[in-house]
Amino acid sequence: MKNLKILIAGAYGVDNWGDEAILDRILFFIRRDFPKARIRVLSGNPSRTVGLHHAEAAQFFPIAFGFFHLSALHKTFQFFKEADAVVLGGGGLFHDSEPRGIFLWSVQCLVAIAMKKPLFVLGISAGPLRRWWFRRLVHMALNHAEHIVVRDRSSYNSLVDIGLDPERILVSADMALLIPRQKITAKRKKVVLSLRQTPFLRKDFPIVISQFVGYLVSEGYRVELISMQNYGENCDPNFAMKLAQNFPIFIPQTLNEALNHIAEAEVVIGMRLHTLIMSATQGIPFLGLSYSPKVQSFCDEIGVGEFTLSSRKANFSDLVRIFEKLVHEWPEPKLKEMRARAEKGLDLFRAFLMKIQH
């Protein structure tokens, strides 16, 4: 029985706390069940990944070489060469709205395939994939994966629709659902907002949100924005500056800081999927503002779809109506069932690694 070398590729190291939560749970699982495994991560910021997760890291394989140092390329190549298994995921990696992501993650898969490395796709979402060249590229990238674990039914449908074998696709759930409950001694009358820049917003969305925050303040709530994406031109703090009022913005420096901030709230209102997932793991009622099918899909599957609004259509009166219903009629989400689905994905991943190990 050999000590495994496992290479994980995903959208890590770019200050997105949802993706870091996924990696945290994948690393926890491998370290628990394969304590002698050597784990390496392909990241957008290797030094950041080393600091956050205490794992070896290198830059993920580039799709353009102009800004990539040869020494970094050599390290990435060595990671692939020495790996016993390559893991892609999780997160929303393949969808039309982010063409660069489709190319980037397809390249990681194609390099693994070219180097004849066993490939496991863990906890991703995919779709919509409408353009034929995207459909073709994703099919090429995933067709040789030994298993594909998706986090929702709509992703399964999207991948089957592009011609992938349904027998190799398992509908699981987001790995971040396995985050444990934080120990919080006291709640605060606080609403946490998680907003993001996206083309899929009504033009007056910042004004609508500002009006709604005014309503929350009049009801005695302290309203704070949490930044779940600190990197890039469209990072959360930049979008918050477009709002008509100045609100406190909390910028976490660690995953635990983000979790604790959410766990202290009475209610969370979020666009970002993992803000809602973290809220569910901490037992906090949440109102979802759906800018993407993955957000609506999660809210439906966990049983709170009625507390979700489209970011294209959300208006002040609907926000107030759903918020008041949420405060008085919040149901018990299907967290236990969703966690069981996530565990099924990990069971398949465990069997994959044990097969390679022996």
Image (cartoon, rainbow, N blue to C red):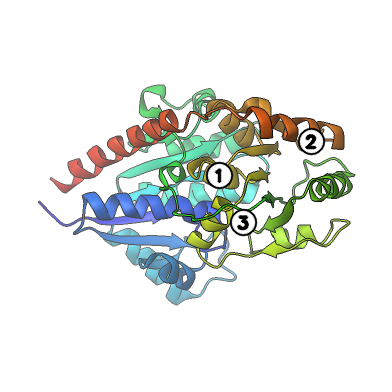
| Residue 344 in picture, x, y percent from top left | 33, 32
In the rendered structure, which disc, 3 or 2, sits on the residue that comes first in sequence? Answer: 3
Residue 87 in picture, x, y percent from top left: 37, 48
Q: Is residue 99 above or below residue 156?
A: below
Whether residue 171 is visible to the viewer of this picture, yes or no, is: no
Front in this rendered view, residue 219 or 51 = 219
Q: Residue at x 63, y 39 (%)?
A: 286
Closer to the camera in the image, 229 or 7: 229
Q: Which residue is mark 3?
A: 228
Whether 241 is drawn above or below 124: the answer is below
Name the element at disc 3.
loop
Residue lying farthest to the left in this orientation = 1
Query: What amino acid is found at the position of numbered circle 2 in the picture?
Result: Leu
Query: Nearer the observer, disc 3 or disc 2?
Result: 2
- The foreground one among 58 and 232 is 232
- Crowding around mark 3 (Cα neighbors within 10 Å: few <14, some 14 to 19, many 20+) is many
Q: Which residue matches tag 2?
A: 319
For marks 1 and 2, give the CA distance: 18 Å
Amino acid found under the numbered disc labelled 1: Ser
Would you identify the image quadrant in which residue 146 lies? Answer: top left
